[in-house]
Amino acid sequence: MPDPTVPPTPAVPLSALLAREDLALRLIAGPSDPSLVIHAAHTSEMADPYPYLLGGELLLTAGVHIPEAAGSGTYFDDYVSRIVAAGGAALGFGLAPVHDTVPRALVAACDRYGLPLIEVPPQTPFTAVARAVWQLLAQARLAELRRVTEAQQSLASAASRPDPVPSVLRQLANRLGGWTALYGPEGTDIASAGREPAAPVPGSLAELADVVRPSGPGTPTSATHATAGTHLAAYALGTGFVLGVATPSREPGDHTIASVAAVLLTLLTGEQQSGSGAARNSALVRLLLGGTPEEVAPLLGKGDKWFVVHASPINKRDIADLGARGTARPATNHPQPPDLLATTALGAALGSTLIDPGGEVVRILLPADRAPEPHPGWTLGASDAVSPQQLTAADTQAARALARARATRTPLVRHGTRTGLADLVPPHEAEAHARALLAPLAEHPALTETLRTWLSLHGSWDRTAVALAVHRNTVRQRIARCAALLDAELDDPDVRMELWFALRQE
């Protein structure tokens, strides 16, 4: 297990603090190991600072607490031993105004107990030392954050390769500088990457994987251990698989990086072990080999229904700030395609791995028992729950719902199922009426879609422009063209109602 006296934050080398010429610090006792690090700076004039230390500190003192006869007794041994017992990383002793030199007995005690002793000159206040420590810590945290971010991006890129599981394992091993392994539900070593460590590390990692493999209530989802100078970690993927990681050292950001890899591997392996996953893969293969949707629909479940969800990442550059009355200016740029990590995270949040991340819009197939919910950072449009044979129509419903959601700045818009007037008209008559009424627009799909969107948004030029990603003048020109071809007065609410009824039959 990790040392409980060491804070889980990036540390800074003690040598980096000593290298600051403006501080003029000098190491006068204790080890000069370049691997020594500190996590904080703390000032105390207590004779026993043990209760006030968390571990990893540079303790600063001016020696106010030292009695006159300290050099002839065990005072300094007791003082230094308590600092070491509390996990203190180093001791800084300030010269003046109390002491002109560092007491020799203190130097000897630090050498005896292996505690680095630093002489702080009179012109260097303790606040300057503490500020320098925090500056170095901030730089270390920034570097660690950059390392984690770059690792997340590289893992997401690896997950999109033709061999995603081996690629993710290789990238994780490279980023952590160690060895990674994927264990199957039966405990077998399925794949690994990196330089395999010598015995007994591989066996110990396999045993640690058994600890997190689901075996009943209370099973941990992750575990760590150390053996033969190697740090081990295991992560349950929730699908019976386990990710194992062995590294020569353990940095604060390593857990975050490994957790990202665990999420990706969970998504990549989740559907492979279930009957439903096999059936869906079979359906995909048959479609690729020329099968029709009607032929493969039974593989998705005869009685099952599905939502089609279209999702677009919120991009502030695409839509201007809302005005006082909620009016938006039209978009001038198309949305940027979302990255794979954000896409897989969205799918996991909605509860599906059936995701098409291609293009500017993400399409997700969601079982009907998992109703779509709003998700931060995304705009969603959802279809009705339909059978597999109706997925093509549902895809169109979701696209229109997303356009309306973007135009109205609504996190989620569901396709409306209430038809009202349509229930009073036989379907074949309604379709015939719609074809006849909209015949002048039959050869102009862009005009038809513009008219549908404009009517659905109550004749708002700005919101229609946003939904279609065109300029508002383009919307005006198209609506004027529709009015001319239909020979209709589109400001008349009766005309609008009839056209909306006809457009709903398509």
Image: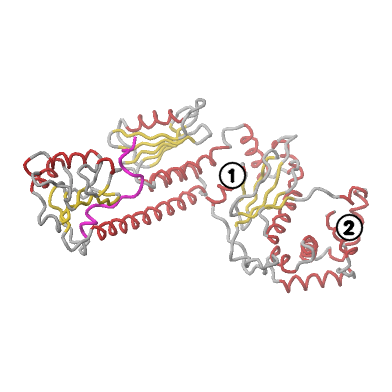
Left or right, 324 with reference to 247: right
Residue identified by numbered label 2: 434
Residue 467: percent from the left, percent from the top?
A: 70, 62
Judged from this view, the residue extending furthest toward the left is 72
Magenta run includes residue 9: yes
In front: 61, or 426?
61
Residue in view at x 46 percent, y 50 percent: 152
Q: Nearer the viewer, mark 2 or mark 1?
A: 1
Residue in view at x 50 percent, y 42 percent: 263
Judged from this view, the residue extending furthest toward the front is 68
Residue 359: percent from the left, percent from the top?
A: 61, 57
Left or right, 61 with reference to 219: left
In front: 276, or 75?
75
Of labels 2 and 1, earlier in sequence is 1
Q: Which numbered dot is residue 349?
A: 1
Q: Which residues are magenta?
A: 1-19
In front: 236, or 392?
236
